[in-house]
Amino acid sequence: MHHTINIGVLAHVDAGKTSLTERLLFDAGVIDRLGSVDSGDTQTDTGAIERERGITVRSAVASFSAGDTQVNLIDTPGHSDFIAEVERALGVLDGAVLVLSAVEGVQAQTRVLMKSLRRLRLPVLLFVNKIDRAGARHAELLTDIRRLLAPHIVSLTDVRDLGTRAARTRPRSLDDADVRTEAAEALAETDDALLARLVDGPLPSPAEVRAALAAATAEARAHPVYCGSALSGEGVAALVEGVVRLVPPGPDHGGTKPRGTVFAVERTAGSATKTAYLRLFSGELTVRQHLTLHRPGTGHSGQITALEVVGRAGERVLTAGNIARIKGLPEVRVGDRLGDFDADEQRHFAAPSLHTLVHTREPGPAAATRLHTALLALADQDPLIHARAMPGGATSVLLYGEVQKQIIAATLAQEYGIEADFEPSRPVLVERPVGVGEACYEMAERGHTGPWATVGLRVEPAATGSGVGFGYETELGALPRAFHTAIEQTVHATLRQGPRGRAVTDCRVTLIRSGFAAPISTAADFRGVTPGVLGEALERAGWRVYEPYHAFELEVPFDVLAPVTAQLAAVGADIVESAGAGAGWLLTGEIPVRTVHEFEHALPGLSRGEGVWLSHPSGDRPLPGGAAR
């Protein structure tokens, strides 16, 4: 029976994930020659900037067949500035291949990616690439993987002539008693039944260990490790066999109602036509079908004008488990959802913690409009950058890091012909209400001259991380639906910008009074009144300002602990835990985003270049001096 597996290929920058994707497609006969990252002619890095810089910045999809299994490869970015792009792709995967370099080993971004994969409990196969490079390691790298990445691994490859161009691999067979015992012992650490067999006997058979390995991989309790070289193709066939045998296809959620997620959007510069990549979890979709897609606070509809199922040329019906390129949805954005999803199925991504203002070098309002339009188009591909027009012609965008800023600048120049300047990045500050506040705008009974709308709102704090909630105490039906929609959408839009230029979050807004005058009132009246009422209610509730923090892990040699910890204290970091780890100390804690770059710049000098730094968004804390008001 033909089935589909959707696999993500993930790695730290330069570990070789794009080269591995090229090799998989070449060996399967999908492409007739191998592309090169250095030459800029790879199959999945199709953008000019990706080819020029040799990095992946957008998720791409390619497909090949292995027996009766279709494997869809989602090639994701490797740079930490694009972690949101990676995490959005993870939500549509059945499993992942995490690529490591046999030379560089477990790197900072490798650990970040593994944490995301572990959180989603996705099956993960590890592929140790570049075994033919000088300095390649095997046994000691497996030790590092167990210590730093995944404690429960099963090595399925032997390597000879390691670190030379003659490096070769040999699959480790579970029919071999020693290999089977080693695998069973590793798996028994998470499998009580298997542990009992090892202790009490009889020893499990090859078939039983294979079944235990498949179950542990599917449940993300253990991870098989393969070795090879993407450039030479050595060991790649064994990896493909492992993917097909150990990663189960995604479950069909049942039912006939379509449910799916848009995880990538493409748009040709200068064209309004968008192509959306949608993974379907249940039901089916066909050309000319009408869809309604949802995102927080709103939704939009369209009709499918073109549908191409990835890997199945000529097929125009998308079924559960597959991915299609879809056109006909003019308002589609990455992250849009089709159908109903349970709360625990929603993907919440850490928001960017930096923001900058972008100015076009060309003077005049027309040039500023072109810049804003281009940045809005880029926001379709990455909604978290949240492009917003500012007074004076600038556009504000959110960022994860400086490389992302460079990519946006290059994209504006190459795809839109816009030369832009970026102001220095600053941390994103947010506000939360500290009390309850109410305000109301009411139409006068006689001689009314203002907007024809009555709106009363209450603002109150909500749980941290809950975002913005909206509810009603007014009787449903008291207002026409269009007026209700206008109020709710305006509330969300106003809070995203904030009365003081900072987004307001973690609060609940309740409509406590409403009224209209038929047939005079319009939705525009309610959109005009709502921001002022909401701002007044927020003012009465009071607020506190918060700044973003990163959680960090830092490995340093034993003899540099004192100067490193002194510098961490100087930049406002809190060290939560310190412990000996291998040849040095492992420090964990939290640091303000505003000082991350300063510390990263100082670390090489403090640690003789041996410090290993890993950080990721972890929430926020009250800004010093940003007391409640």
Image: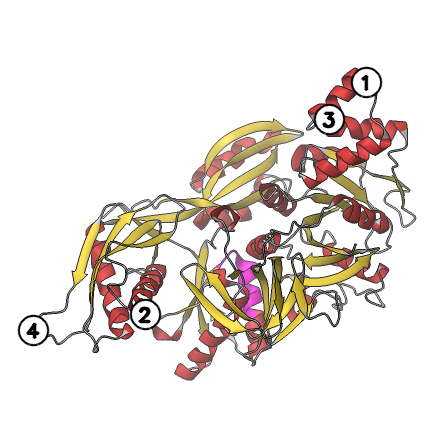
Q: Which residue is mark 2?
A: 482
Q: Which residue is mark 1?
A: 201
Name the one closer to the observer, 477 or 242.
477
Q: Looking at the image, which residue sits at the far top?
A: 200
| Residues at discs 2 and 4 in contact (Cβ within 8 Å) | no
Name the one closer to the observer, 568 or 416.
416
User: Is residue 182 shown in magenta?
Assistant: no
Q: Looking at the image, is mark 2 or mark 4 earlier in the sequence?
A: 4
Does residue 487 sit above or below 305 in this rendering?
Answer: above
Residue stretch in magenta: 399-409
Q: Looking at the image, is mark 1 or mark 2 earlier in the sequence?
A: 1
The spot of residue 133 in percent (x, y) is 83, 49
Q: Which residue is mark 4?
A: 446
Q: Is residue 157 left or right of residue 542?
A: right
Q: Looking at the image, is mark 4 or mark 3 earlier in the sequence?
A: 3
Does residue 185 sit above or below 234 in this rendering?
Answer: above
Name the one closer to the observer, 398 or 307.
307
What SS does tag 3 mark? Answer: helix
What is the C-alpha distance between the residues marked 2 and 4? Answer: 25 Å
Name the one closer to the observer, 244 or 558.
244
The spot of residue 181 in percent (x, y) is 83, 26
Q: Closer to the camera: disc 3 or disc 1?
A: 1
Q: Looking at the image, is mark 2 or mark 3 earlier in the sequence?
A: 3
What is the C-alpha distance between the residues marked 1 and 2? Answer: 70 Å
Numbered tag placed on residue 188 in the rendering: 3
Q: How crowded is the residue under tag 1: few (<14 C-alpha within 10 Å), some, or many (20+)?
A: few
What SS does tag 4 mark? Answer: loop
The amino acid type, in three-letter code, at marker 2 is Ala
What is the C-alpha distance between the residues marked 4 and 3? Answer: 80 Å
Q: Is residue 595 among what the camera can see?
A: yes
What SS does tag 2 mark? Answer: helix
